[in-house]
Image (tube, rainbow, N blue to C red):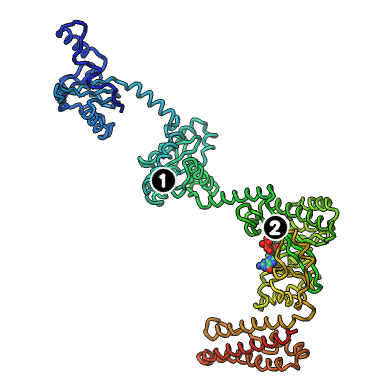
Amino acid sequence: MTNSQETPQNPRLPLTLQLGNATAEEQQRLMASIFAHTQEGIVITDAEATIVEVNHAFCELTGYSREEVIGHNPRLLQSGHHSPEIYAALWQALLDQGHWQGELWNRRKDGRMIAELMAIWAVKDLCGAITHYIGIFSDITASKQSEQRLQQMAYHDALTRLPNRVLLLDRLQKEIARTDRQDILLAVCYLDLDGFKPVNDLLGHVAGDQLLIMVADRLRHCIRESDTVARLGGDEFVVLFADLTRVEECHNTLDRLLRVLAEPYTVSNQSVEVTASVGVTLCPQDGGDADTLLRHADQAMYLAKQTGRNRYVLFDAEHDRQIRAHRDQLSRIDTALDTGELRLYYQPKVDMYRGTVIGAEALVRWQHPERGLLPPSEFLPVIEGHILMVKLDHWVFTEALRQMACWHMQGLRFAISVNVSATTLQQAGFPDWLAALLAAHPQVPPQALELEIVETIALDDLGRVLPVIQRCITLGVGFALDDFGTGYSSLTYFRRLPVRTLKIDQSFVRNMLVDTEDMTIVEVVINLAQTFQRAVIAEGMETALHGAALLRLGCHCAQGYGIARPMPPEAFPEWARGFTQHPLWAAGMAFEGVLLINVEAEHRTWVGQVDDFVHGTLPYAPLINDDQCCRFGRWYSQQGLLRYGHLATFQTVEPLHRQFHQLAQELIGLHTTDASAALARLAELYAVCDALIEHLYRLQKELLAP
Ligand code: C2E
Ligand code: MG
Ligand code: MG
């Protein structure tokens, strides 16, 4: 509705007009002639909007005779096309500005709609009071209809007459904005027919088109007025369910929609069946813009196809976010590799028995421009199993070889171990690549390079990995089995893998002094290595005391914070020059001290088990060796007695130790006959254990004193 620029003082139909020197009577006649013959309909009402006069054109355009409308309100022509607000605005403009102009759809007497370009004025008397309203209008139905046809063509699909992508996007944007303002849900459903192509191929395109029209009709019937169904092209449709309050409403409607679409269709006198796969994304949970929502719904639709068709799948916004984040991380790591942000650190490996540095393990780091130096746990899991892992491994090997060559030229003949991923070992071309790298560094003997593979990974693809490992071995490089003890079926695979070294996993080494089971595992792995004639090295050696325990168990080589943390290459030669053997590792020294620490762990574990048993939380009686058979008992009655039997502190341990074992067995037995008596004596066992440990520490101090 546009307002006229003309004012009531300058109306298009002047009531007083000076026509040359025509008389008032001539003017009157002229005016009447214009009124009678003009092509535009004219209606004149009084101040109360009752029609007092209409012209001939009015009667022609509306189909009403003069007599039928005089005395009536123009409301009689209303079509119901416009809302009451439009008429209210019209009257408001007439009252405020004295005129209104705009387009109105009215209804002719025969019921047909007519589009009118209408201008209305209020006519006032000399005192400014409204005396009449004059309306003048022309019929613009034809141009309106062609405009509508153009609109229809621009915004609708010609075949199904459903909104097309342009109109869909417009509506989608409006609906998204509405979900922002109101507490409502919008479901964007991307729909693709299953089995449409065969209909098109077998029955022809005309039948295909018929089918699409029928599908469009069924879709139209499944939705409410506030919803939108659009055709994107081919057999792809989009339905927008607006104004949802709960997700369940969407589920119900989609169930119905799938059922309705799956009903048989008759095209070209044949019955055909098609179903639909639907992908759905919900706004505002999915906070994307219109294009993104459509893309997400499309992705979910593919999932619906893949998982069996004739179904709908909800887009998982969180899952998608994770996938995109992962893709970003991959590309960031790739860039880091290309721009030289990765570093290799070196953690020394030593022979504790001889007191020498045997080499180092190369460990990758990321010197991140914002986040600082990152450990591999921050980025390796992201590329695990991805081809980028191969790129990283190649970089590590290249850098390690360059560094080794550099050290070798300075006379520093360190052996370096490099971690290699299963992904790289699965590349059949890896041995050739490594051969070329070694050939490019003739200063480095291949024997100085060791490849560490992780036991758990080695299990996965042994068939593919074994030939690669064997070809690498022919180049002269060695292999170590990393993190040994953490995988499963260790023995079987260990036997098949041609590794020369076992690396005991740090988790066992770390707790071996306080956890007897870990101590046992370390012991078993060392024995295993010796039995199969492999070298063994312990990683995660955090204190010199751990080293002493390892030495006692027969493992001479170690790596860990107790020796040195991983360091940049420039620091390594100096560190190696300054390395000295820890006094605890000098042959035979640490043996007892370590043993005693372990005794504490073992005996306290037993006390805990007895406690649980008499309280009823351990369902079976704990197995406790007697004082002759426990680890400490064996040492005490053999080597201990031989070496320290003369010491008073040594002698007084024995009765305490026996008392401990006897009391523990007694309480276990008592629990079955008199549970409360066993409970009452529990404190006694704790006290004896404390006394034993205290005594052992006194002995340890005495033995270790220089
Ligand atoms: P790994 O090969 O078992 O390396 C030993 C890890 O234990 C290193 O962690 C090292 O810093 C850490 N470590 C050494 N001694 C101690 C100790 O006494 N206490 C404790 N708590 N930790 C100790 P890092 O450097 O974080 O590496 C973690 C893992 O990432 C490595 O385990 C290895 O599997 C992998 N990795 C590291 N660098 C590379 C690489 O260049 N290529 C590949 N493919 N993997 C690598
Ligand atoms: Mg390693
Ligand atoms: Mg390891």
Location of mark 2 (residue): 364
- Image position, residue 359 (x, y; %): 78, 64
How many numbered circles are shown? 2
Is 62 placed left or right of 579 in the picture? left
The span from disc 1 to disc 2 (Cα, nearest Å) is 48 Å
Q: Can residue 201 be seen in this view?
A: yes
Q: Which residue is drawn at 45% across and 44% down?
A: 188
Relative depth, front residue between 250 and 333: 333
- Image position, residue 668 (x, y; %): 58, 89
Relative depth, front residue between 318 and 345: 345
Q: Residue at x 53, y 37 (%)?
A: 197
Mark 1 nearby-residue class (10 Å; few <14, some 14–19, many ≥20): many
Three-letter amino acid code of the residue under disc 1? Leu
Ligand 2 lies in which image quarter? Answer: bottom right
Three-letter amino acid code of the residue under disc 2? Val
Asked where in the image residue 547 lies, by quadrant, the reply is bottom right
Q: What element carries label 1?
A: strand
Relative depth, front residue between 573 and 12: 573
Q: Residue at x 62, y 58 (%)?
A: 378
Q: Is residue 674 above or below residue 259?
A: below
Point out the tag, 1 or 2, that comes first from the N-terminus: 1
Quarter of the picture containing the C terminus is: bottom right
- Image position, residue 213 (x, y; %): 44, 34
Q: Which mark is residue 105?
A: none
Location of mark 1 (residue): 186
Is 499 placed left or right of 517 in the picture? right
Is the CB–ligand 1 distance for label 2 below 8 Å? yes
- Image position, residue 218 (x, y; %): 41, 39
Quarter of the picture containing the N terminus is: top left
